[in-house]
Image (cartoon, helix red, strand yellow):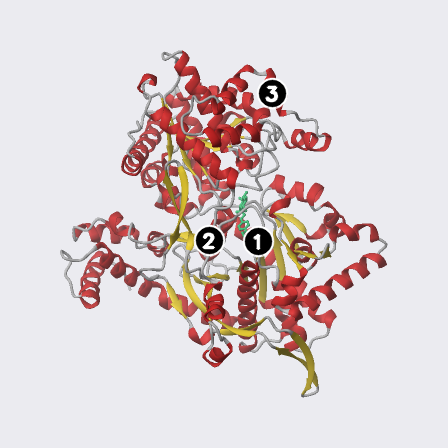
Amino acid sequence: MQFTKEYFIQEFKKRLNEGYAVDIKQASNFELYQTLASIVRSGYNNAWHQNIKNNAREGNKQAYYFSIEFLPGRLLQSNLLNMGWYDTVISGLKDLDIDFYEVTEIEKDMALGNGGLGRLAAAFMDALASSGLPGNGNGIRYKYGLFKQKIVDGYQVELPNEWLNQGNSWEVRRDSKAVDIHINATEVSLLEKDGHLVPVYHGGKVIRAVPYDVGVVGFQNGCVNNLRLWDAEIPESEEVNYRTLDERRKIEDLTSILYPDDSTSEGRRLRLLQEYFFVSAGIQSILKHHKKAGHNLNKLADYVAIHINDTHPVLCIPELMRLLLDEEHYGWDEAWEITTQVMSYTNHTLMAEAMEKWPIHYIQELQPRIYQIICEIERRYVESLEKRGQAELIPSTRIIADNQIRMVSLAIIGSHSVNGVAKLHTELMKSQVLNDFYRLFPERFNNKTNGITERRWLQIANRELSKVLDKTIGKTWRYAADDLEMLLKYQDDEKVLKEINHAKYQNKVRLAEHVKKSNGLKISPDAIFDVQIKRLHEYKRQLLNLLRIIKLYQDLKENPNLDIQPRVFIFGAKAAPGYHEAKVIIKCINEVGNLINNDQTIQDKLKVVFIEDYSVSLAELIIPAADVSEQISTATKEASGTSNMKLMLNGALTVATLDGANIEIKDQVGDDNIFIFGLTKDEVTAHNQTQDYCAWDYYNNIPVIKRVLDALIDGSIPNIQVEGRHVFDLLTRFNDQFFVLADFEGYLAIQEQVDQAYRKPLAWAKMSLINIAKGGHFSADKTVQRYAKEIWHIKPVVEKDEA
Ligand code: 26M
C-alpha cells in the first residue's frame, strides 16, 4: 500500500470518528494523538508479526539485550520517521488545520531509565532494528518512570511520574507468553522423576510474569523488532497463598518503581527481586521459544546471544544454569559451556561505590537454588585457579567474599566477552580496576565505544539544521550518518556557514520561548548558550561550572563594563533523591541564578537557567540550541558519556577534559575544533596513588579561588547559608575528591578562549560545521554492528533499503 496524503487524511477522519465519535474541530489533542498512534501501529503490526515468524522459520540467531532500564522517550515521531511517513503526516495534518507538534506533546516520555545507561539501551534497540539485525530487548515495565523533578525555593522536589495514566499506545500485553517464577523457597530438595532428579521447591511463592511487547521499528527497512517489558502479577491459582494485603502489595510493588540512583549501589531487597524477576522471566521465555522452534538446547549458542547490560541482569548466568541443570538435566560442564558461550557483559562504570555487591543471605532467601549454583560456580572457579597456579589472583577476583556476592566477578567469569564503553574506559578496565581479570582472561576484553541515534537527535530534533544539510550535501546522510563528512567540503563556504548559524539561531529562539514559559526568564538568542545537561553528580562537576559563573559575576560587579560575550548558562540535571551533596549543588545553582538573573547592574551579560525535569524530550529541545557543550568530568570518572556526542552532532563546541569518549571526539574533530583542559588520567591516577593533593593549598595560594569560595560562605549569595558552607567544606575540609580546584584555572583559561572564538561568527561556524560533519562517527548503528559482528555473531535479516 502506498501511504499517500489522501489515504492518510481519509483514514484519520474515519478512525477519529469510529474511536471517539467526534469530528476534527471538536477533537482534543489527546484524541488526535491516539488516532494518529493507532494508524502508525496498524502500519507496522504486520511487519512485526512477519518478523517474528521469519526469525523462527529461518532459524536466525538473535540477540537479547537484558537491561534493567530502557529510556526511549517519546515514540510517535521516531516511529513515523522510521516508517517513512513523517512528511506525509505533517502535511496531511496541516491540511486538516492540526498542529502536529502540539499533538506530539501529548505523549508522555517512556522514561524507564535514569540516564546514560538506559538511554543507550533504547538507542541500541533503534539501531538494531535500523540495521536489520534480529535483536530484542528484555526489561521491566515500571508503573512509575523516573521521578518528576520540580524546583521549589531552589530545592529539588520529587514527584511520581505516572506515565501510564492515559495508557501506552505502543505496548501489547501478551497473556499467552506469561511465565511463572518461584521465589523465597525455604528449601530445595531433589526428587526422582522419570529417571531424573528434579528439584522441588518448598515454601515460597509463585509470581506470574506477564510481558508487554513494544514494536521497535527500523529506519525504512521493514524490520520491526521486539522490546519485551515484564509486569508482575499474582497467579489466580496462588491467590490463597497470599494471605495478607502486605504480601499482595509486595508483588504489586515489584514493578512499581524504577530505582532513581545511578551511581551508588544501595542494596535494597526489592531491587534484587526486580533483577531476578526480569532475568528469570526473560530466560524462561527464550528457552521456551527455542524449544518450540524445535531446536536442541545443545545448540543454544547458535540461535541465541544474551547481553548483560551492566551487572544488574547478571543473575542470567546462574538462572540459565539452573534451567539447564534442573529442568533440562544437563551435566554441569555441558551447561557451563552453553552458558558462557551465550552470555556477554558490558561494564559502564569503574567507580567502586557503583559496583553491585549483595549480602549472601539476600540471595539465599530470594532463591536458595540460585545461591547453591553461584557457590558451585565459585568453587570450581577457585579450584581452576589453584590448578593453573594462579592462586594469588583468587582473593581479588572470586565471587564470594566478606559474605557478599560480587556481581562483577560473576559477570566476567560467566561471559565470553567483557566490554567497556569508550577506549579510555576499556584501557582503565584492563590496566587498573579489572586488571586481575584481564590477566586471567585477556581474550574476553574488548572495547565498544557508545553511540547515539542520529535520526532522533538530528532528523527529528533539529529540523532546521537537517534542511540545511539536505540542501548542501543531499539526503544520503539520513541513511548513512558517515555521509555527514561530505559537509567538510563546505567548511570555507560562507553561505553554508551562515545557514548553519541561522539554523542554530532559530533553535535558540525556540528554546528561549520555552525558558520564558517555564522559568519566567527572558534570555537572548544572541548570547552564548552554554549547556550542561546530565545527571547531577560530583564527578561530573557541575560545581566547576558554577564556580566559574560566580567568578564571572564577581568580575562584572567589579567592572560592569568588562568586555565579555553575553552568556546564558543552562543546566538540566536530576539528583538521586538520597544523594545529599547533589541536592545541595542544585540549590546553590538556583540561588546563584536568582542573584544573577535579578541583578540589573550586569546588563544581562549573564543568565543562569536551571530547566527543571530534564528528560529525553527536553534534551530534544535543548541540544539543537546549544553553542557550548560542557563535558568536564574528572578524568577517569566518566566511562563514556553520550550527551557529548549528541551536542557535537548538533554543532555545539565541546569544552572537555580528556575523559571518556571526549578523547575520541577530539581525535575526530582535531585539536583546533574542541576546547580541552584539565588534569589527565595519569595526573589524576598519580594524585590518587601518592595522596599528595591538598585542596587547602589551592584555596590559600590562589586568590581567585579564595575569592570564589569565600562567596559561598560570606553571605554574598543569599539563601545558601547551609548549602554554601557544605559546598565550601566539600572543596576544602574534605579535600575536593574530584579535583575541582586543581582544574579551576585551566577551566577559566579555556573558557576565555571560547569567549574570544565566539566573537568571530564565521570561524565559529566553521568549527561547528566540522563537529557536525564528524558527528556521524558516533552513530549507534555502527556501534551495534560491531557488537553484532564481534560479540553476538548475528547477521542482518533485512537489508537496508537505500531509498
Ligand atoms: C544500580 C543499583 C541500584 C539502583 C540503580 C543502579 C544503577 C542504575 C543505573 C546504577 C547505574 C546506572 O546507570 C549508570 C550509567 O548510566 N552509567 C553511564 O552509562 C553510560 C552508557 O554507557 C555512559 O555513557 C556514562 O559515562 C555512564 O556514567
Q: Quadrant of residue 591?
A: top left
Q: Nearer the viewer, mark 1 or mark 3?
A: 3
The structure residue drawn at horizontal position 73% and vertical position 54%, both measured from the top left corner, is 402
The structure residue drawn at horizontal position 66% and vertical position 58%, both measured from the top left corner, is 359
Number of other residues with Cα within 10 Å of mark 3, as a class: few under 14, some 14 to 19, many 20 or more = some
Residue closest to the eye, 169 or 13: 169
What is the C-alpha distance between the residues marked 1 and 2? Answer: 15 Å
- Residue 169 in the image: state x and y as whole percent: 33, 62
Badges 2 and 3: C-beta atoms under 8 Å apart? no
Q: What secondary structure is found at the residue carrying circle 3?
A: helix
The structure residue drawn at horizontal position 48% and vertical position 80%, both measured from the top left corner, is 240
- Residue 125 in the image: state x and y as whole percent: 47, 56
Q: What secondary structure is found at the residue carrying circle 1?
A: helix
- Which residue is labeled 3 in the image? 698
What is the C-alpha distance between the residues marked 1 and 3? Answer: 45 Å
Sequence order check, earlier mark of 1 and 2:
2
- Which residue is labeled 1 in the image? 787
Tag 2: residue type?
A: Ala
- Residue 357 in the image: state x and y as whole percent: 64, 54
Tag 1: residue type?
A: Tyr
Sequence order check, earlier mark of 1 and 3:
3
- Quarter of the image where the N terminus is located: bottom left
Q: In which quarter of the image is residue 181?
A: bottom right
Q: Is residue 537 left or right of residue 150?
A: right
- Which residue is labeled 2 in the image? 122
The structure residue drawn at horizontal position 62% and vertical position 43%, both measured from the top left corner, is 351
Do we see residue 62 in this rendering?
no
